[in-house]
Amino acid sequence: QVQLVESGGGLVQPGGSLRLSCVASGSNISLYRTGWYRQAPGQQREPVADIRSGGGGATNYANSVKGRFTISRDNAKNIMFLQMNNLQPEDTAVYYCNKVQSWPLYPWGQGTQVTVSS
């Protein structure tokens, strides 16, 4: 049974930083293209960043976060990270991790809330 547990969210002022973690159990996430999604209130869930399978996984970012967010993965520990710098109010959302363009997706975790506000 695959389980994803996201953590690291919180309340931060504009310009601040957070590091999100996604701990996966029951599946080796390095075998798949995986990434982060976010869902703002009243909005659909959208992809934010992803990393290809394998050790030297290429990365891809949504234009809205390019240059501010960095995705990485510790294959040995089966954990994925999202370093978020220069956070802005529009980054406020619940952040989730999952496969990207690889079906079936894992069961969604509970997500982690990121709130950017002064």
Image (spheres, rainbow, N blue to C red):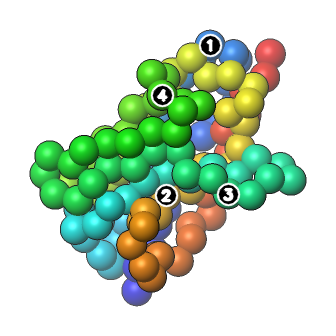
* x and y percentages locating residue 53 in the rendered image: 23, 59
* x and y percentages locating residue 101 in the rendered image: 42, 67
- In depth, the one of 90 and 73 nearer the eye is 90
The first of marks 3 and 4 along the sequence is 3
Identified by mark 4, the residue type is: Lys
Helix, strand or loop at mark 4: loop
Residue at image mark 2:
97
* Above-or-below relation of 89 to 58: above
Q: Which mark is residue 45?
A: 3
Helix, strand or loop at mark 3: loop
| Cα–Cα span, label 1 and label 3 | 23 Å
| Cα–Cα span, label 3 and label 4 | 18 Å
- In depth, the one of 11 and 94 nearer the eye is 94
Identified by mark 2, the residue type is: Cys
Identified by mark 1, the residue type is: Gly
Identified by mark 3, the residue type is: Arg
Q: Are marks 3 and 2 in contact (CB under 8 Å)?
A: no
Point 37% across, 59% down: residue? 34
Residue at image mark 4:
66
